[in-house]
Image (cartoon, rainbow, N blue to C red):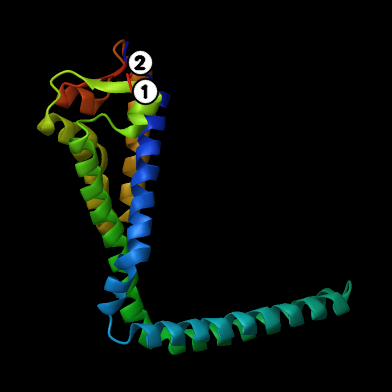
Amino acid sequence: MNAGFFKRLTSSLIDMILIFTIIYFSFMLFGRSILQNQIENYDEINTAYLEIMSVYNENMRQIQREYDVQKELAGNDEELKTIALQNYLEQANILEDQNLIDTAPYNGPLGIYFTSVVYYYMFVFLLLATLYSLLLKGLTLGRRLMRIKLDGPVNLMSIFLHDIAFKYLLIIVLIPINVLFALMLIMFMFLIDTALIAATKNKITIRDMISKITVVRTEYKY
């Protein structure tokens, strides 16, 4: 019997959690330092930026406290409340403008670093997911726990197409181009998979059809 949507979804989530856990520890152990070393004087830049933001946030909290006091003292006097709000907004705008000036020299290098972090996670995820699926021949931990497996012409190419190319690759390619489009694609794929599995007799998705593979229930002999 072919596997239902929630078994397939749960198995994918288990595999993704496992892969992202490995990526996270790899990033903390060596990935972070490698990327930071690509930015000249990263530690000084990051420290200065954090100090500026700390001062800015404290100043914003201070004018918020002052505004709350003025609003309370105004009682039911709407005119005084309006004046207090105007004073708050004027001070907030001044602080915001000054913060933009103060952080401007650091936005470039820090932006490059955080963009590199995103690319690191994307590239390593794609690499690990590919190796994970191919080396285990599709019998991933998630599928084993959910007692499902791939069925049909299962080979390295069909596994790559089914588990990687039609599942993650396009989303990963879209993320650097437009995050919104990537999120919309994820939602679209989710809805299409749900509808096809619910509506079709064989519970197959588009990637099942293209790769000529189905996901079936099974029992594993551990």
The C terminus lies in quadrant: top left
Q: Is residue 123 visible?
A: yes
The disc labelled 2 sits on which kind of residue? Ala
Q: Circle 1: is it few (<14), some (14-19), or many (20+) Cα within 10 Å?
A: some
Observer-nearest residue: 9 or 104? 9
The disc labelled 1 sits on which kind of residue? Ala
Residue 209 position, x and y percent, is 19, 22
Q: Circle 2: is it few (<14), some (14-19), or many (20+) Cα within 10 Å?
A: few
Question: How many labels sit on residues?
Answer: 2
Residue 33 sits above or below residue 11 on the image: below
Q: Where does label 2 land, which residue? A: 199
The label number, if any, that marks residue 206 in the structure image: none
Residue 215 lies in what quarter of the image? Answer: top left
Is label 2 in contact with label 1 (beta carbons under 8 Å)? yes
**How far apart in space, not on screen, are marks 2 and 1 (Cα)?**
6 Å
Label 2: element kind? helix
Residue 220 position, x and y percent, is 33, 19
* Horizontal side of residue 129 vs 60, given as left or right: left
Label 1: element kind? helix
Residue 140 sits above or below residue 120 on the image: above
Residue 212 lies in what quarter of the image? Answer: top left
Residue 59 sits above or below residue 176 on the image: below
* Horizontal side of residue 124 vs 179, given as left or right: left
Name the residue at 38% across, 18% down: 198
Observer-nearest residue: 55 or 65? 55
Q: Where does label 1 land, which residue? A: 195
Residue 137 position, x and y percent, is 19, 31
